[in-house]
Image (cartoon, rainbow, N blue to C red):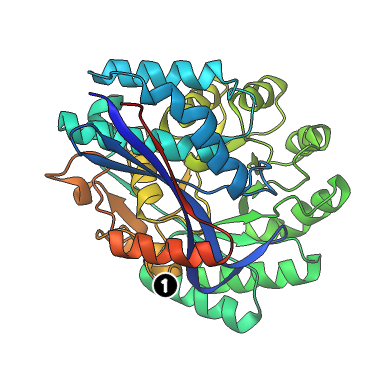
Amino acid sequence: MKIRSIETFRITLPFRFSFGHSLASRSESTNLLVKVTLSNGIVGYGEGIPRDYVTGESIDSAETNVLTTYAPLFLSANINSPSELISLLESGFDELGLHSKPFGASWCALELALMDAYCKEWRLTPADLLGGVRTEKIRYGGVVPFGGKKALGAILWFYKIYGFKTIKLKVGKDLETDLEKLKICRSIMGEDATIRVDANCAWTLDSALQACEAFKPYRVASYEQPLPADDWDGLQKLTASVEADIMVDESLCTIAQAQELAASKVCSAFNIRISKAGGLLPAARILAIAKNAGLRVQMGAQVGETGILTAAGRFFGCLNEPFDNYEGAANFFLLKQDLTVEDLTARPGGFGDLRFSRRKYGLGITVKDSRLLSFTEAGAAAGGDCREHVAAS
């Protein structure tokens, strides 16, 4: 089965509220969608979220990579089995040097679109393609962005009533503010809640050590990316000095980085995000590195994911043994409108499973074409567009 065309869409998704942390604040997300159409008309969708302050990828470079570098590898291929698809994806990834290049968002969008289309053709799901379900359901945690006391209290009370048991606070403005936020969080969420913090590169080694000491009364389980992404020496010293987990995120953008981080004992935990990693297959390779090194693992998510990436993350979570924490599935909470018919928002208690994909194939989601075009038009007004690469006849 050959590919008829590969199209890209730049979509701009408005949020219900502004989401901020130490590196950025946004009220919308500009994502890259890839649409793969097979020769028999079957369509698959994939999504990636380029963030220049994380990997250096822009929406322009991500789209260019898909159309000019990646698409030609697949347009001429005749793919007839799951093993052929996986082999082509893995060989293409390695031949392009993506093992050490932080171009995850662009490759992720194409990988997911190919998996979605071909799994529909073969009447399979990613679970069938990648080894079967190991976890029947996962439990997401809630993430709290920067904001004032009133907003913080409102979000935490909602999370408490909704049943979330893990909360991640964005920190890094100043120690006094962060301590006040932790105090409010522990007070509202209770003693049995797990509290994690994410500094998004905001601290130095000295300020991180000071914060970790000050935060002890609130029993913080992990400190995510406390130091700048390239300060591996500082991260290594912090990991050796602090009992709680030191988790890397912005420092972990490629498989090569995962290997070096694990070998050098720079951290004690990985945050693996599907889009940043390059899709399900590269994410699985990073997970294996973490497990072999005895590191803890969190399944992360990027702000602004539609149901496409949420579905991919749900499969990734359920295809593996339980992680320490899961993030994502905030679709209805954050997006004014999603792209998919299916609502993959975490259910009360934070739970999510694969019931949305029952009696369906591919990623198990249905993209609303009218919304896709509407959001693409909004993106086009800001300089975006839709482009297509068609197989030669």
Q: Is 333 in front, or is 268?
A: 333
In the orientation shown, which residue stands out farthest toward the front?
Answer: 393
Left or right of 136 on screen, residue 259: right
- Residue 383 placement (x, y as % from top left): 58, 60
State the quadrant of the N terminus: top left
> Which residue does the image show at 56% across and 35% down from the upper left?
65
Q: Which quadrant: the C terminus? A: top left
Residue type (three-letter) at the residue carrying disc 1:
Lys
Q: Nearer the viewer, residue 161 or 28?
A: 28
Query: Looking at the picture, how far across and down is residue 225, in whole percent?
Result: 69, 46
For residue 329, what is the image quadrant?
bottom left
- The answer to whether residue 201 is above or below residue 278 is below
Residue beneath disc 1: 336
Task: Pick the residue in front: 50 or 175.
Answer: 50
x%, y% of residue 210? Answer: 83, 54
**Number of marks drawn:** 1
User: Residue drawn 67% across and 48% down?
Assistant: 52
Q: Residue at x 61, y 74 (%)?
A: 184
Q: Is residue 112 above or below residue 165?
A: above
259 sits to left or right of 202: left
Which residue occupies the extreme right position in the image?
A: 206
Residue 154 visible to an observer of this rendering: yes
Rendered position, 13 above or below 249 = below
Query: Disc 1 on helix, strand or loop?
Result: loop
Q: Residues within 10 Å of mark 1 (few under 14, many from 20)?
A: few
The answer to whether residue 20 of the structure is visible from this angle is no
Rendered location of residue 298, percent (x, y): 51, 42
Q: Is residue 358 left or right of residue 224?
A: left
